[in-house]
Image (tube, grey):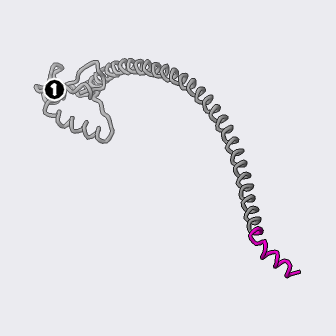
């Protein structure tokens, strides 16, 4: 029997090889068809997901735009409220500055009167030309201090001209250290 199989193999070798090749080609085509079908199904599924996601994104963007408009209106209103509050704060600061100046002036006068009332009258008469100045006395050389450096805008402050450079150095050094000074009384 072995010889018979060998005889058939030799006589029909070409047909057997052709049959094997045909089976292989058919297998490749079948495999390719299955892969193409699976990929086609996957593309369809992804297309549906993309359409669904695009719709949801469009809806979310529409909602976001309407919320942004509301936020813009609220921000505009809040900005106006802040501007009004800032104006009110400035008005109150100006009023407080005027009151502080009046209180400072009154307390300075009271302090001076208290000192004068406790000094021996004889001593006061004897040395008044040296230690006490006439109420109308004003130094000969005075210069105005810049309004940016004065605490209250309601009055100007004069300062001894010879000492202004030292005052400017002090204020500049303070600003360099992020400290802001204002002149309350010169």
Residue topped by disc 1: 143
Left or right of 73 on screen, residue 12: right
Left or right of 26 on screen, residue 87: left
* The one of 169 and 161 positioned closer to us in this rendering: 169
Q: How many marks?
A: 1
* The one of 46 and 9 positioned closer to us in this rendering: 9
Q: Quadrant of residue 124?
A: top left
Identify the main secondary structure in magenta.
Answer: helix
Residue 176 in view here: yes
Span colored in magenta: 1-16
Residue 166 position in % (x across, y down) = 19, 37
Indicate whether residue 4 is drawn in magenta.
Answer: yes
Toward the right, the furthest residue is 1
Q: Quadrant of residue 43?
A: top right
> SS of the residue at dot 1?
strand
Residue 53 position in % (x across, y down) = 64, 36
Image quadrant containing the N terminus: bottom right
Image quadrant containing the C terminus: top left
Identified at 29% across, 38% down, the residue is 175
Residue 173 position in % (x across, y down) = 26, 40
Toward the front, the furthest residue is 11
Residue 122 in view here: no
User: Considering only vertical position in the picture, is 162 above or below 94?
Assistant: below
Identified at 16% across, 25% down, the residue is 133
Residue 7 position in % (x across, y down) = 82, 78
Indicate whether residue 82 is drawn in magenta.
Answer: no
């Amino acid at each position: 029997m072995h010889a018979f199989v060998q005889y058939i193999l030799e006589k029909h070798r070409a047909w057997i090889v052709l049959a094997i090749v045909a089976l292989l080609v058919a297998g490749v085509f079948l495999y390719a068809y299955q892969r193409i079908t699976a990929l086609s199904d996957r593309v369809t599924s992804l297309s549906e997901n993309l359409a669904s996601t695009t719709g949801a994104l469009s809806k979310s963007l529409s909602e976001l735009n309407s919320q942004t408009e509301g936020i813009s209106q609220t921000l505009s209103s809040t900005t106006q409220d802040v501007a009004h509050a800032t104006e009110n704060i400035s008005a109150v600061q100006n009023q407080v500055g005027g009151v502080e100046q009046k209180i400072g002036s009154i307390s300075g006068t009271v302090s001076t009167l208290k000192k004068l009332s406790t000094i021996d009258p004889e001593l006061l008469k004897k040395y008044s030309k040296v230690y006490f100045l006439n109420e109308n006395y004003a130094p000969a050389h005075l210069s105005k201090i810049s309004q940016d450096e004065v605490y209250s805008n309601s009055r100007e402050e004069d300062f001894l001209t010879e000492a202004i450079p030292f005052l400017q150095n002090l204020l500049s050094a303070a600003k360099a250290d992020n400290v802001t000074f204002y002149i309350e009384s010169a």
